[in-house]
């Protein structure tokens, strides 16, 4: 039998409920903050990611699913969403609608990484971007939004790591100082970091190899070398976060794996997840749209790894994201009442309720088991005695409570149950 591809897991029917609950909750909160959904293609011209994410990055050098299509064009499955969103933003002139455009995208991303716990080749992100404003207020609203999302999902105390990696003004001098420092310790660096030292020295600070971390100990940090305007921006972000009582730790080693970042960068880390512990990451990218050939467009955003959120919740065995039992299952005793049961089920569905009925002539016990398995909250039991009296029994599987209700009144009765228990 042909198997699925390693690192590209199926999401099976009994797991889908948690994904849907996560995404429904997320869309609701994003809507409250004024974000509009956008959907871009799963593949783009390869050049978009090479220019956007940066040639020296691991993603572009080692991880992209790149292929030539039948017309000979080089295309790539999106490894992330920011470059695609900025392409769409510039191409469709979304700036004309508003000076600050708030967009989000939920969907799969593709990176050819070595699969391990929490690291997949097809994974899913909630990507959120606030496009067009340079001010620290936008940085703070974005962080407050992410903080709010984590709280709503049931992960309220996930630590926030914050940094500023400067801009085109202050980074070149810093880069020189860092390279000078690392050259003195070059023999300690791994093969990848030798290349990084030439192409992208900041990434050495982020290498997970113990020898490289040792070599980078005591290296100058960008946080100490920011130019005046970057320092002011960072101070303002920190002040506003303090005002909102959002806790954070300044982590000067947080450099992120994509080249487009400027100034504010951040990650939310769940240490319980092991090596792949970033549940969300992002930052400001004031030069990206220009890099892609568009107008200057200061922006900031983040992406959340949905697998890592669900894994974090599974570790806690709780959290707000669970697919609670909903809807109603119509169970029958005896064949004679079957036509009534079908009619009642159809009626309940028309009234907007999730409703199921036995299609396989199971025993009552078998039907009750099925109702539980399918995640129904209520069971309506129809027997010929009840029907003769024009009644039905409604059982709440969550509480075990059981009441008799007039047959014509079943839909109305169930409608009075709070919507969240039925929808
Ligand atoms: P990123 O840090 O590469 O940033 O990815 C964001 C999140 O996606 C990570 O924190 C992690 O939760 C999840 N993730 C990344 N790679 C994998 C993987 N192989 N398997 C499972 N989960 C993964 C970005 O993608 C930027 N586009 C974020 C951004 C948006 N910056 C500004 N706007």
Image (spheres, grey):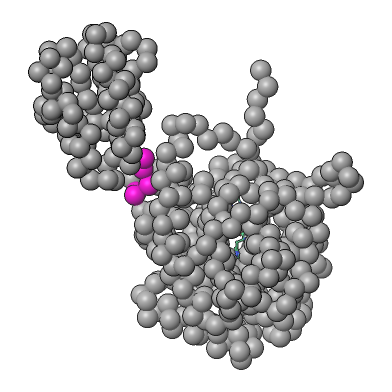
* Residue 68 placement: quadrant: top right
Q: Position of residue 223 (x, y in %)?
A: 59, 80
Q: Which residue extends farthest right?
A: 72
* Residue 345 placement: quadrant: top left
Q: Is residue 12 visible?
A: yes
Instruction: Reply above or below: 399 against 60.
Output: above
Q: Is residue 190 visible?
A: no
In-image side of 36 versus 108 (left or right): left
Of residues 182 and 146, the one drawn nearer to the viewer in this rendering: 146
Q: Position of residue 369 (x, y in %)?
A: 29, 20
In-image side of 162 versus 68 (left or right): left
Q: Position of residue 159 (x, y in %)?
A: 44, 63
**Looking at the image, which residue is at 75% across and 46% down?**
65
In-image side of 46 versus 342 (left or right): right
- What stretch of residues is rendered in magenta? 319-324
Quarter of the picture holding the N terminus: top right
Instruction: Reply above or below: 172 against 308.
Output: below
Please tell me whether the stretch drawn in magenta is mainly helix, strand or loop.
loop
Q: Position of residue 129 (x, y in %)?
A: 57, 66
Quarter of the picture holding the C terminus: top left
Q: Quadrant of ligand 1?
A: bottom right
**Would you say residue 323 sits in the magenta stretch?**
yes
**Looking at the image, which residue is at 73% across and 56% down?**
58
In-image side of 259 versus 218 (left or right): right
**Looking at the image, which residue is at 64% across and 70% down?**
94
**Would you say residue 52 sits in the magenta stretch?**
no
**Looking at the image, which residue is at 76% across and 50% down?**
76
Q: How many marks?
A: 0
Q: Which residue extends farthest top?
A: 335
Instruction: Reply above or below: 128 against 341.
Output: below
């Amino acid at each position: 039998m042909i198997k699925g591809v390693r690192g590209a897991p199926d999401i099976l029917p009994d797991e889908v409920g948690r994904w849907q609950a996560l995404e429904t909750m997320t869309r609701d909160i994003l809507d409250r903050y004024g974000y509009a959904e956008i959907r871009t293609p799963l593949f783009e011209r390869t050049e978009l990611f090479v220019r956007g994410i940066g040639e020296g990055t691991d993603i572009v050098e080692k991880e992209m699913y790149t292929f030539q299509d039948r017309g000979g064009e080089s295309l790539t499955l999106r490894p992330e969403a920011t470059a695609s969103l900025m392409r769409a933003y510039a191409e469709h002139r979304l700036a004309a609608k508003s000076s600050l455009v708030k967009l989000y995208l939920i969907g799969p991303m593709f990176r050819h990484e070595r699969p391990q716990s929490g690291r997949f080749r097809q994974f899913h992100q909630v990507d959120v971007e606030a496009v067009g404003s340079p001010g620290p207020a936008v940085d703070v609203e974005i962080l407050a939004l992410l903080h709010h999302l984590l709280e709503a999902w049931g992960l309220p105390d996930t630590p926030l790591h914050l940094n500023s990696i400067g801009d085109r003004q202050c980074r070149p001098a810093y880069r020189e100082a860092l390279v000078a420092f690392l050259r003195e310790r070059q023999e300690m660096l791994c093969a990848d970091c030798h290349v990084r030292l030439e192409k992208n020295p900041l990434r050495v600070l982020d290498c997970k190899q113990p020898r490289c971390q040792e070599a980078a100990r005591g290296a100058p940090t960008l946080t100490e070398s920011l130019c005046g305007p970057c320092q002011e921006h960072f101070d303002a972000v920190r002040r506003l976060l303090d005002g909102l009582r959002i806790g954070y730790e300044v982590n000067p080693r947080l450099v992120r794996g994509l080249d487009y970042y400027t100034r504010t960068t951040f990650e939310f880390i769940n240490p319980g997840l092991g090596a792949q512990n970033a549940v969300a990451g992002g930052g400001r990218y004031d030069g990206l749209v220009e890099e892609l050939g568009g107008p200057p467009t200061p922006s900031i955003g983040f992406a959340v790894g949905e697998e890592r959120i669900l894994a974090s919740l599974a570790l806690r065995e709780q959290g707000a994201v669970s697919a609670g039992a909903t809807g109603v299952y119509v169970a029958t005793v005896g064949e004679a009442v079957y036509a009534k049961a079908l009619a009642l089920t159809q009626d309940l569905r028309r009234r907007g309720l999730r409703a199921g009925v036995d299609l396989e002539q199971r025993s009552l016990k078998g039907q009750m088991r099925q109702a539980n398995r399918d995640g129904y909250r209520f069971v309506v039991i129809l027997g010929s005695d009840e029907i003769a009296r024009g009644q039905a029994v409604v059982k709440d599987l969550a509480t075990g409570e059981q009441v008799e209700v007039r047959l014509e009144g079943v839909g109305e009765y169930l409608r009075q149950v709070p919507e969240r228990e039925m929808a």
